[in-house]
Amino acid sequence: MTFELVLFIVVAAVAIFSAAFMLISRNAVHSALFLVVNLLCVAFFYLMLSAPFLAMVQITVYAGAIMVLFMFVIMLLGSERLGGGTTKYGWLAGGAVALTTIFLVVVFVGIAQAQIGTLQPQAPPPQARFIHSIANAPAVDIYLNEQRVAADLSFGDATELQTLRAGNYNLLIFAACPDPDCPSPFERGATPLVALPLSLEPERATAYIVAGTPEDLRLLSAPLDLTPFEAENTFRLTVVHALPNFGAVNFIQEDLGNPNRNVVLAAELNFGDVSPMLSLERRQYDFLFENLGNRVIALREYSARSRTHELLILTAVPVPAVAGAPSTRPSYLRPTAPAARHAFGSPQQLGTELLTTYLLPFQLVGLLLLATMVGAIILTREEVLKRERKRLVVSPAIKRINRAIPINVSAESAEPALPSGEREPSAD
């Protein structure tokens, strides 16, 4: 049994007992303090899950601000104690402690026997996208086994990043059928343009580029790094040489003011080569493809969105036909760059998850918390009103004193007494 598991069991026991005492405490202030302990235990769980942002939110918002609001309501209503007398559920304390003890014993035995500390988290599934980079080539359909992953993919088109199952596949590339009602290539017995084995491994994202010539298709692969960025204002860049029958090129960061300060970012890239991943600060760049000292393509004022992985594919684009034959010239493709994942527990990741996957549960929990707070205030108010009514009841001693004092005083006794020997003046 690992130290983390023992620590989790201890903190879980504290959380459960504090929750039980929060419910059975007759003092509202003590109940609120037990709730604070419970919230701190939950924050500790977030720290164990490597989510420091959620832990700080739990402490600052719930254990801090919201509990201050609760204490303000308790003090405002004067309901530190919920009243004396016998409790309606006197058995609740003993029952809660007994059930909690049984639950902890069962969980401890189950976790100890299951060796949960040795389990590894499930790896994220592989992701892939497909890009067509052959000029003057027809559109294609791409299949993994019999699953179509790209339909009618034309030159310059790129699919979105797709989540696929890990495993071994047969990648098949067919010429796209122009008829929308055309049956699948397996039904019509079409011959694939490219057929090769493909292995998709978990935790990997890859861009597959259809390159080569219309007569000889090739499939190039470029890894994509979608892990969280350490610096927010940066992006990643990978250069792919997908121009057949062309010599080696250098990819250069050019300084227009001083050519001596040019920096070679990727050297001697031949057809099919993929450059090492470049991590660049987000700003405008001047890039240059160079072949044997000659400029091939110049990219001016190149910029990218932060936290993305850019692909720059050296290829060719069609130009007006010369002597009736199709012609091309060197150029580049720049497909839409996928954004990297946010760090677990970060504000961005939390907002994305809440506003997409967990939007409805999040709203339901919010409504439940609101109803709970309103109900708690109403129940506390009823207890306070009962106590105030008890205070208004007159004690028997006060009643005896009140009965001893004459209530109806005669008119004669109420008149003021005159000094002896004096008579009240007559009206005459």
Image (cartoon, rainbow, N blue to C red):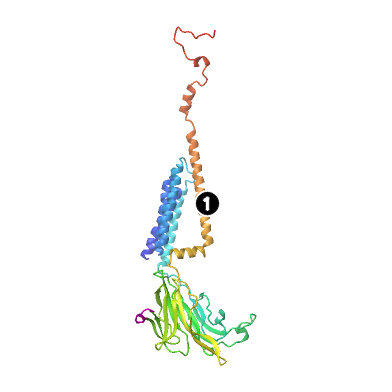
Q: Is residue 99 above or below residue 270?
A: above
Q: Residue placed farthest to the front in the image?
A: 257
Identified by mark 1, the residue type is Ala
Is the stretch drawn in magenta largely helix, strand or loop? loop
Horizontal side, residue 55 vs residue 165: left or right: left
The location of residue 366, given as percent across then percent down, is 51, 56
Q: Is residue 375 visible?
A: yes
Residue 261 drawn in magenta: yes
Percent of width and height locating residue 383: 49, 42
Boundaries of the magenta span? 255-262
Q: In the shown orientation, is residue 264 left or right of residue 368?
A: left
How far across and down, in percent of the image, does residue 165 sit?
A: 51, 76
Residue nearest the observer in this picture, 115 or 392: 392
Q: Residue drawn 50% across and 9% down? A: 425
Specify whether residue 96 is painted magenta: no
Locate the N terminus and report the quarter of the image it occupies: bottom left
Choose between 180 and 428: the one closer to the eye.
428
In this orientation, which residue lies closer to the viewer: 235 or 48? Answer: 235
Rendered position, 312 above or below 424: below
Seen in the picture, residue 412 relative to 90 is either above or below; the reply is: above
Determine which residue is flagged by label 1: 371
